[in-house]
Image: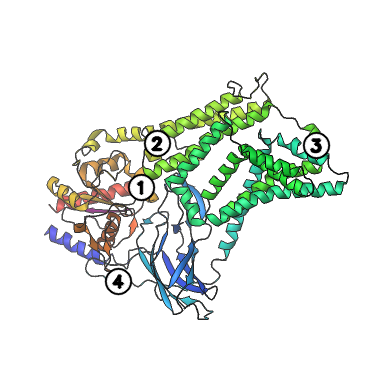
Amino acid sequence: MKRIALLLCGLLLAMGLQAQQLSPVKWAYSVKETSPTEAELIFTAKLDAGWHLYSQHTDPLGPLPSVFEFTKSADYQLIGAVQEPKPHEELDDIFKCVVKSFSGTVVFRQKIKRVSDKDFTVKGVHSYQLCNDGSCIAPEDNDFSFKVPGAKQAVAEEVAADTAAAVTEPAISADTLEPAQAEVDAAPATTDTPSEEEPRQSLLWIFLIALGGGILTMFTPCVFPMIPMTVNFFMHGSDNKRKNRRQAWFFGFSIVMLFAVLGAILALLLGPEALYTMGTHWIPNIIFFVIFFTFALSFFGLFEIKMPEKWVNASDEQADKGGFLAPFFIALTTVLVSFSCTGPILGAALVGLTTSSTDRWVSLVTMLGFGIGFALPFTLLAMFPQFLKNMKSGSWLNTVKVVFAFLELAFGLKFLQQADLYCNWGLLDREVYLSLWIVIFGLLGLYLLGKLRFKGDDPVEHLGTGRLMLAIIDLAFVVYMIPGLWGAPLKGISGFLPPMESQDFNIEKIVAQHALSAGPAAVQAGKLPADRKYADKLHVPLGFEAFFDLDEAKAYAKANNKPIFIDFTGKTCANCREMEHYVWVDPEVKRILCEDYVIVSLFCDENTIELPENEWVVDDKGRTLKTLGRRNLNLEKTAYNMNAQPYYVAIDADGRVLTKENYKYDRDVQKFVKWLEEGKVNHSKMQ
């Protein structure tokens, strides 16, 4: 009788769970003609308060990016990639990297060239991950459609699309629910206005950084000696001061032009897609590492990098001819001769700035700013050569070069680490990376204190105040990094470090694991079959063991007469990690989960694992789901009418729900314990 009553309660509960799937975003699609042959496809996302979606260009360590895929057609051609406004950037404590996200109303744009002179439809799918403070929704494919006028038609008004996708699939219960209708709002023409201002601010910031880098090059050992050599021309020039100043200005302008031409070439060759690839793919990251490492060795004095002498001599010969050509060729000679010092700094600026931005013109802005900064001291001194009397070179220039060498070596490791992460080589885990940085900056501190000497250095007989202050800052930074070898988060530099998961020795986790594994909680540890599905690719927190396939978990639970704890989770779900870090580790929670339940973790965003054909699932739209993540998400939606993670369900081996309500994100430990106990009690009653 008790079983019948519980079954009836379960049926009534299932009928009352309608409309629980979250739809925190509504999409609208419109078309704007920009020329007789081109048009702009406008994706407008309106997010509910508190929700955010992620940029297309997320850190590989962070959440899943938004993705737009267009169905190929002979009617149109894509121009560039989908453009997005400037995202909000924030260092995330869970992902340990900078996360780029949007909230409110967000407008994405895709330019197309209209090839057909007849009306046509642009179709495709887009996917995106959404999160708020309590839930995350794993990405799934959502269809979009645009009706586009033909190339020869003069249609000035925007054409609204006739279909729109909400963040999730239509709400469906197991047997009784019908697909819900997704709401579509019109896209206001002014919603994306702020997005045009923000890139300008970003480019201005890049310009200022490059300008500062150009000015700093004046204090490198191969640029500083060029100052008296080049300005000497203006000191012995014409008696006409006005003419000399015009030549000085033309000299500075020539330097800027030389850098700007190179920047323009890079801007034409590198679009947003290429710049993004530079920042993520392992091949360019390896190339950048080799460049940094090579210049570091050069700065240490192992060899010298310089332009071919023929180029420099030819430039000198032209400079001797006088006239306005002379300042140009002096500028060219200055740029060529100083390349061995400007090359590494300029290379670092281009690599760092272009890989952190997807704006096509970032390389031009970088080179222009660097050129102005580089030319400014030369130009001012050429106009006022008397200032040269107070400037003296010496061993301090070599010190600057060696300090640059240490920095090139340290920051070059970041690119090697990115390549290592991309290819899963396992060469630079967190401990190895930190050890190298500690040694590099430790040696830099010893060098600043005069305990190390390189080629070109004079003995440090007296330690200056400035050098001492730099050494104190550097060695304090070394001390700050040391606890990271035992798992300290080091939030100040977490953006440069490998993920915490790569750390083999984490004392915090080991202590927690030891404390929580003592006693009954250790019963389950090591008891699950070693050959369970996906155990070699997917993992749960330390001290827990889990299945990753529901059928396997049911079979094991039936054989051991235990209830099942379903953990709908995601690899990039920050809220899931919070529940694990703050709730699962509680001793009582750990004891109940490990002793009384069979855990099955179903990752809803794991779409790199392909399912065998006999495990493919067809969803309500007739689409075949071929990956583990999409199948798990479809199960969560159809069986439990939910699409967000984390989401916890307690069932028996026959799939019957054991609690009145399933558990969502809530860090109240006592509430979670009470929910787990409810599942245990009801499971025992149904036996």
How far across and down, in percent of the image, does residue 412 sit? 50, 38
On screen, residue 241 versus residue 577, left or right, reads: right
Q: Residues within 10 Å of mark 3 (few under 14, many from 20)?
A: few
Identity of the residue drawn at 23% across and 59% down: 616
User: What predominant SS class does the magenta segment belong to?
Assistant: loop
Q: Residues within 10 Å of mark 1 (few under 14, many from 20)?
A: some
First reached walking from the N terminus: tag 3 or tag 2: 3
Secondary structure under tag 4 reads: loop
Of the numbered discs in the image, which one, if any, rests on residue 429? 2
How far across and down, in percent of the image, does residue 475 sit? 55, 28
User: For the residues carrying marks 4 and 1, which lies nearer the camera in this image?
Assistant: 4
Q: Amino acid at mark 2?
A: Asp
Q: Is residue 150 above or below residue 656?
A: below
What is the spatial separation of the Cα atoms under label 3 and label 2, in whole angstroms?
51 Å
Q: Residues within 10 Å of mark 4 (few under 14, many from 20)?
A: few
What is the spatial separation of the Cα atoms under label 3 and label 1, in whole angstroms?
64 Å
Of the numbered discs in the image, which one, if any, rests on residue 387? 3
How far across and down, in percent of the image, does residue 435 sit? 45, 30
